[in-house]
Amino acid sequence: MRLRHRISTNFVHAQDYHYDVMGMKNRRPIKLLVTDIDGCLSNGSFSNYDLDVLRRMLEQNERYLVGEPGVPAITYCTGRPQSYVECLAQTTLCPYPAIVEGGVMMFTVEGHRIDTHPSVTPQELKMIRRVMDAVDDAFAERGMSTLWEPGRALNQVLLILPPNKSQDFLALARDAALPVCGDAMMIDASHLCIQFVLSRFDKGVGLRWLCSKIGIDLSECAGFGDAVFDIPFLELCGLSGAPANADEPTKAAVDYVCQKTQPWGIVEFMEYVIDYNRRLEQEGTGHGC
């Protein structure tokens, strides 16, 4: 059973947190904080970013880069495409790669490096293109055009913009795609789109890949997410948190549930993780950050 810590009154500063470091499952300092974007840093499409929150994240990465004790780096694990995440990663000075497209791709600011997960096969790449063609044809037969989200390489998103509702077109999209992909892709609708996702990948696969690439143990990561799609990577982390607006399954899966909703929940969790590291050091159980 995971130990959760809730703050249910007013905002509590890092020095005011109370918990038993020695009693927690992870007793290694956190070197990397990995956060989702939608639902954590913003309320998704059609909402604005709080520049003060991004500034706090930038400042923390600057503190990490100059070697301030107990301060972990910050990066992202998101379903968003590389071109979207690139802007955030540059703005917040991410020193490590970001996981994009839900675990199948990785973007590194330094060198503008874009990597596809090494296990993706040529057959899967061809299948994705065939799925998109089949969906295009099915919509065209109904006299409708399709708009695929630009910038995606593998996991695809078919945009269904208001006043249309994505749920109304889900059956059409599935009927067209399933003869091509079978159970190799998950096809589901959100309020603005229909998603086509490779079934064998999730954010947990992405985090394992990231850690193996940069030489950080999973137990040295802190994860922050708000939705059930985040649970596969949150459960791998040595420490995990969620904003107050997270869904109930995600809150139940993490160690720490913030009082604050997005976007300030991430700042609360950042302070919590730094305080956790420093308390580990005071207890003599940390091994450096």
Image: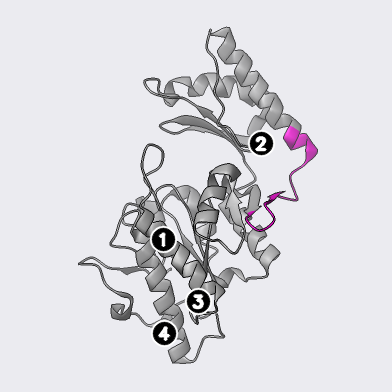
Give percent across and percent down for residue 6.
30, 67
Q: Could you tell me if the residues under marks 4 and 1 are in contact, i.e. CB atoms within 8 Å?
A: no
Residue 234: percent from left, percent from top: 50, 60
Residue 110 on the magenta span: yes
Q: Give the range drawn in magenta.
A: 108-125
- For label 3, the residue is 26
Q: Name the residue under label 1.
A: 55
Tell me the SS state at disc 2.
helix
Earlier in the chain: of badge 2 and badge 3, it is 3
Q: Disc 4 designates what residue?
A: 279
The residue that appears at 49% across and 59% down in the rendered structure is 92
Q: Earlier in the sequence, mark 4 or mark 1?
A: 1
Bin the neighbour count of mark 2 within 10 Å (Cα to Cα): few under 14, some 14-19, many 20 and up: some
Of helix, strand and loop, which one carries label 3? loop
Q: Do the residues labelled 4 and 2 touch (CB within 8 Å)?
A: no
Amino acid type shown at disc 2: Ala
Instruction: Tell me, for residue 133, which label it has, or none.
Output: none
Count of numbered badges drawn on the protein: 4
Q: How crowded is mark 3: few (under 14 residues within 10 Å), some or many (20 or more)?
A: some
Q: Is residue 143 above or below residue 201?
A: above
Residue 118 among those drawn in magenta:
yes
Which residue is more in the foreground, 275 or 88?
Answer: 88
| Mark with earlier residue (2, 1) | 1
Three-letter code, disc 4 = Arg
User: Could you give the CA–CA distance between mark 2 and mark 1, rounded to whole angstroms?
Assistant: 40 Å
Select label 1 or label 3 by which is in front: 1
